[in-house]
Image: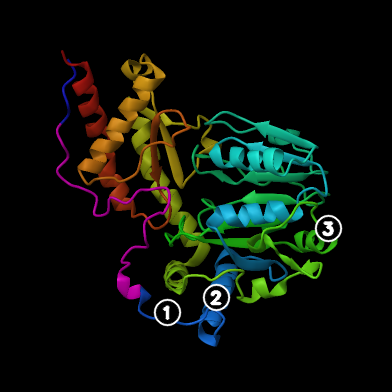
Amino acid sequence: MTQPITKPGTRPASPLFSSGPCAKRPGWSLDALADANIGQSHRAKGPKAKLQRVIEDSRAILGIPEEYRIGIVPGSDTGAFEMAMWSVLGARPIDILAWESFGQGWVTDVVDHLKIDDVRVLDAEYGALPDLDAVDFARDVVFTWNGTTSGVRVPNANWIPEDRAGLTLCDATSAAFAMELPWSKLDIVTWSWQKVLGGEAQHGMLVLSPRAVERLDSYEPPWPMPKIFRLTKGGKLNEDIFRGSTINTPSMICVEDHLDALDWSRDIGGIDALIGRSNENFGVIDTWISQSGWAAFLADDPALRSTTSVCLKIVDEWFTALSLDEQAAIAKAVAGLLDTEGVAYDIGGYRDAPPGLRIWAGATVEKSDLATLMPWLDWAFETVKAGRTQP
């Protein structure tokens, strides 16, 4: 009979390891929202200046070229990316890369809803990546930089040529502010506030290269465009969107919160510091995995492992002999036990992924909290295993 190990005596100072919405920056409190422009039109001078500041601070921290447009749009990352697809796709054939749930969602949008004829889907199972050498850049290319639900990211941008004919559309929601994004290789990039910087939901960011603007100015999609998706006005790019005027009404409380996160990012050293914190956090999990007898990364290739949404599989021999339904129940029980103990909230693997755990290691998480969490993972797994194997 397997005996549970001793329960650790110390809990993480923060149990917030969810992959979205993610943890707030260290030291955050409601006081950070005190200067929010509530009760005013978002088109008034003060609120509009703050919206513009979100754009310019994002540009400065991420190193986005001046000639690229940056806009705040509705619907979080999903709204931003669908807005981009609805607006520019259909002018060329398309290659879509899909290796987890969000990429598969973009496949559904393009194939089933936009019904574009010439589409190639390059896909892979959870934990792997499609053949990047097979991508045809004479076509428009749709991909996620970091697979939030699989823990698999593209290793670099070497596979993307500078002289491509098509556009590259990159969903970077769990990569922006945690991984280096090579802007010259990317034509459309989206992310949401609630990922790496721990902001609030509903708002998305949309970045357009000059090549993307040229497409918008010269191409009119054949399908009806919902109002909140319309990036053009009179057949040309609606520049107001990229000067602090949003398509719909934003929450100025959320704007204030995001400005606080951007200020924190700048204060700790900008993008290099943010990437460094994520990498150090990932290193804690990596060290623990190297000594674990029951857990492993879902991504076997170290070059493909996400440093933000870290996805783990259970490789214990007892566990792998169980049915898939039984494995899912065990993984859920492990995550549930940690939740009940107030040690880690919302770290169960994504519902479509292989049974396991998913731990957010982005920049707003403290390295010390992850180090404290690791023994709890061992305790929770061994406790659940003992409960299932004893007579």
- Name the one closer to the observer, 222 or 377: 222
Counting residues from the N terminus, which is met first, the one under dot 2 or under dot 3? Answer: 2
Disc 3, SS: loop
Q: Which amino acid does label 2 sit on?
A: Leu
Using a 10 Å C-alpha cutoff, classify the residue at mark 3 as few (fewer than 14 neighbours), some (14 to 19) or many (20 or more): some
Residue at position x 46%, y 74% from top? 252
| Residue 51, numbered label | 2
Residue placed under numbered mark 3 in the picture: 219
- Near mark 1 (Cα within 10 A), the count class, few <14, some 14-19 or many ≥20, is few
Q: Distance between the residues labelled 2 and 3?
A: 28 Å
Applied colour scheme: rainbow
Q: Which of the two marks, 2 or 3, is nearer to us in this view?
A: 3
Q: In the rendered structure, does residue 13 fall within the stretch colored magenta?
A: yes
Could you tell me the amino acid type at mark 1? Ile
Indicate the position of residue 248 as horizontal and vertical percent values.
58, 69
In the drawing, does residue 112 fall left or right of residue 390? right
Q: Are marks 1 and 3 in contact (CB under 8 Å)?
A: no
Residue 275 seen in this snapshot: yes
Three-letter amino acid code at disc 3? Tyr
Query: What label does residue 38 carry, if any?
Result: 1
Q: Which residue range is magenta in the image?
A: 6-32
Q: Nearer the viewer, mark 1 or mark 2?
A: 1
Residue at position x 23%, y 36% in the image: 337
Q: Which residue is drawn at 24% across and 50% down?
A: 12
Relative placement, left or right, of 110 versus 221 is left
Whether residue 91 sits left or right of residue 370 in the image: it is right
* Residue 94 pos. (x, y %): 77, 41
Observer-nearest residue: 122 or 270?
122
